Structures are given as structure tokens and as C-alpha cells.
Image (tube, helix red, strand yellow):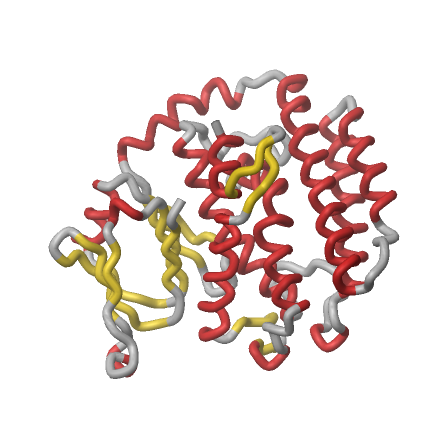
Amino acid sequence: MTVCCITGYGKRIRNEKGLIAIDPPVQEKEKSGKTTIDPDDLSLVLVTGDHGISTSAIRLLLNHGIELVLLDDRGSPSGFLFPCAKCAMIENAAWQSALPEKNRLRVARAMVEQAIRNTSGLLENVWKNMKNGKCPATPELLAYAARAKKTVALSDLLGVEGMATRRYYRALAEIIPKPFGFHGRTRHPPRDPVNSLMSYGYGNLYGVIRTALVRAKLSPFYGVLHADYRKQEPLVYDFIEEFRQPVVDRTVLTMLHHKQVDPSYFVVAADGCRINPEFKREYARAVLARLDAQYEYRGQNMPLSVAINAQAR
């Protein structure tokens, strides 16, 4: 899966003889050249910031089956453009909405259990590298994973998921350097640099997950666990849980460990924390590069992008 993420401001995206051409802002033309991409090499285009895109470029993307996802400056999806050929997902909406609760519960249990195990595995690895010891949250998280597997109602499963998530973020707060001001998860808006990185990274991942679901001819509007997210896309929120840690959180923690992130790369204000444009570009590149990392899926190692598509199918 090749994902193109266009960040910053003032770029021009156009069709140049069957290729996607991305021109730099006028003020950067002397130091930055034009980028051209063969649409046959693309699977998804993410756009954040303010840019100009021609209808010819949009048509070229759609004719090649490529989705275009527009993100706001914090990484939350604003909207999607996808080819008419992918509207087959609408035909599946009826059976998805009528899925019996016992079937929804079975799928949701597997998703939540794996997501919790991923948080435990990530914390163990990070604790070993950054504190040279064992993470005290691991036994609790593994116990939550076991409880998730045995829940008998979706409401119970949501409760277990919530408790595990809060424990995970409390553990992260113990290991993230104090200058970053992380005390737990904050959203809408994120209040500190780490939360802003998580939110922006999850937004990029959201686009990837949604594309995988649509390609599998699934409607993102009918979920199995977060089914009451009426104004959003519940299935995307269900599906993304398993992949937040291996794709986004691991990227954030690795960059912190290697001192590739500094509080000066962010602006903290009353309306939340924002990433500066230059670092946003570097960070988006790192998050999307994680999609090529190996991930164990059903007993086999494969790139995360392949596992995401396989899981959707």
C-alpha cells in the first residue's frame, strides 16, 4: 500500500500527462522541485492544510480507483472522495445493519482482546528499552484482555475496553518525558505535544483503515462495537483499535526515545496544541513508513498494510 500524504500550505496538485504532479508553494520553488507520482503506484492520498487541486487530478485519481481523504489541521477526517465503482459497500449496508448481536459480540471481542494485547506488548517493549525493567501495567492489561474474551454483552465489553484504555494511558504518562506535559489522553482538542501527535497520527491511520474497509466492500457506517457513533463511521472506529499501537503509538514513542521530538516543535494555546508544519511533514512520513513494518497476523509475519487489508476481508 503506497500512501501519499500532502501537508503544509500552498501546493498545487494537478494532472500532468497522466501523472500526479505536486508543485511546491511559490515561495519555495527555488529550493523545492516538483514531485510527480504515477497513479498506478498509489493506493490512497491524504491531504491536510490548504492546497489547490485540479478537477483533472481528482478525475485521474478516481479513474485509478484511488481515494482522496481530506484531513483538518489536527488530523481528523473532514471528508472523502472515492470512485463510483466502490459504491458496492452500500449494497452490504443492509446485512451489516441486521447483523445479530451475538455475531457482533464475537467479532468485537476479538478486536478488543487483540487491541489490549497490543497495548501490553508495546508497553513491555518500551519499558524494557527506556526503563530497563518490566512494565507494572502488564498484568492488569492481560487480565483485561482475558475478561474481554469472556464478556457476554457488548455493554460489558465497552466497559472492559474503557478500563484497559485508561490503564494504558496512565502507564504511558509514567514513561513519557515530563517536558511534554502528558498526563493522559485528551482530544477535541489535544492539549499537549504527545496528544497532538497521537490525534494527527490516528487521523492518517483512519484514512488507511477506511480505504481497506471500502475495498473489502464493507460500509463504514455499521460497526460491531461502537455502533452508536451515529454521526461518524463506527466500523472504522472498531477496526482501527487493533492498529493504533503498532502504527501510531509505536512511532511516537520511538521518536521520543531517539530524541527526534522536541517541545519546541509545537504551539500550545488555549484552543489546544498544534504541530508545526515542518515537523508535521516529517512525522506523517514516519507514521506511514510504519505500514511497511512487520506484524504478526494469524501466525504469520507480514507488513502492517497487508495485515490491515487481510483483516478487512
> Does residue 155 lie above or below 39 as drawn?
above
The residue sitting at 15% across, 51% down in the picture is 18
* Residue situated in front as seen by the camera: 81 or 164: 164
The residue sitting at 70% across, 73% down in the picture is 180
Residue 132 position within the rendered picture, expressed as x and y whole percent measured from the top left: 82, 62
Looking at the image, residue 166 sits to the left or right of residue 97; the answer is right
* Residue situated in front as seen by the camera: 111 or 90: 111
Residue 245 position within the rendered picture, expressed as x and y whole percent measured from the top left: 64, 49
* Residue situated in front as seen by the camera: 126 or 116: 126
In the picture, residue 300 is in which quadrant? top right
Looking at the image, residue 66 sits to the left or right of residue 8; the answer is left
Looking at the image, residue 128 sits to the left or right of residue 302; the answer is right
Residue 139 position within the rendered picture, expressed as x and y whole percent measured from the top left: 87, 43
Looking at the image, residue 185 sits to the left or right of residue 226; the answer is right
**Residue 76 visible somewhere in the drawing:** no
Residue 278 position within the rendered picture, expressed as x and y whole percent measured from the top left: 45, 75
**Residue 185 visible somewhere in the drawing:** yes
Q: Which residue is the extreme one toward the left?
A: 17
